Amino acid sequence: MLWFLPGGESGAGIAGYAMRHPIFNLLARWAVLALGVTLATKLVSGISCDDTATLITVVVVLSLFNAVLKPVLLFFTLPFILLTMGLGVLVINALLFLWAGRLVEGFHVAGFWPALWGAIIVSLTNMVGSAFFRGAPRPPRPPPAPPAARGGGDVIDI
């Protein structure tokens, strides 16, 4: 390993440095989301996307929905989500997918059921992609050193 590359002697190298960079993380997440939306358009008959520019717009809109609207919707529908044992999250994802279809010109979602299947496909793609880009876990930190004893041993002062 060359000493002037990021990562130096630690063995992380340029790839390890890039994987931790926030811009790389964002681009990787967008690429996985684009793959999921593309798979949804190919596998679900009620979903279609006109061109690549529309796909990029859909990815940006879904990213904004997931960052802004989804936490608010999860908070307000928490009793419903708990009552359905988590299946309510699929409904929220389907609604966000359906809203993206209504908002972006050239991205067509026929109704709720195609949106639900598209949301499931995108969720599975994101789950697999996240596992792929996560990488190896960081090693645990060593335990802290014990405090230095005063004097010759344990003494109880009364």
Image: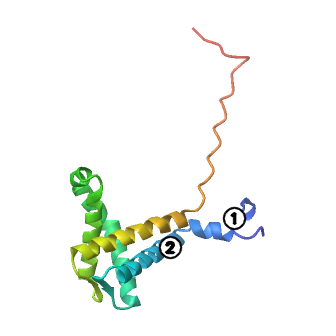
In the rendered structure, the answer to whether residue 94 lies left or right of residue 17 reads: left
Which residue is pictured at 60% across the width and 59% down the height? 136
Which of these two is toward me, 16 or 37?
37
In the rendered structure, the answer to whether residue 99 lies left or right of residue 50 reads: left
Which residue is pictured at 29% across the width and 64% down the height? 90
| Rendered location of residue 157, percent (x, y) | 60, 11
Q: Quadrant of residue 10?
A: bottom right
The first of marks 2 and 1 along the sequence is: 1
What's the mark number on residue 28? Answer: 2
Q: Which residue is mark 1?
A: 7
Asked which secondary structure carries label 1, the reply is loop
Which image quarter is the C terminus in?
Answer: top right
Which residue is pictured at 74% across the width and 17% down the height? 152
Please tell me whether residue 43 is drawn above or below residue 2 in the rendered image: below
In the rendered structure, the answer to whether residue 131 lies left or right of residue 109 reads: right
In space, the residues marked 2 and 1 are separated at their CA atoms by 20 Å
Please tell me whether residue 49 is drawn above or below residue 4 in the rendered image: below
Q: Quadrant of residue 57?
A: bottom left
Which of these two is toward me, 112 or 135?
112
Give the amino acid at mark 1: Gly
**Which-is-in-front pick, marks 2 and 1?**
2
Give the amino acid at mark 2: Ala
Asked which secondary structure carries label 2, the reply is helix
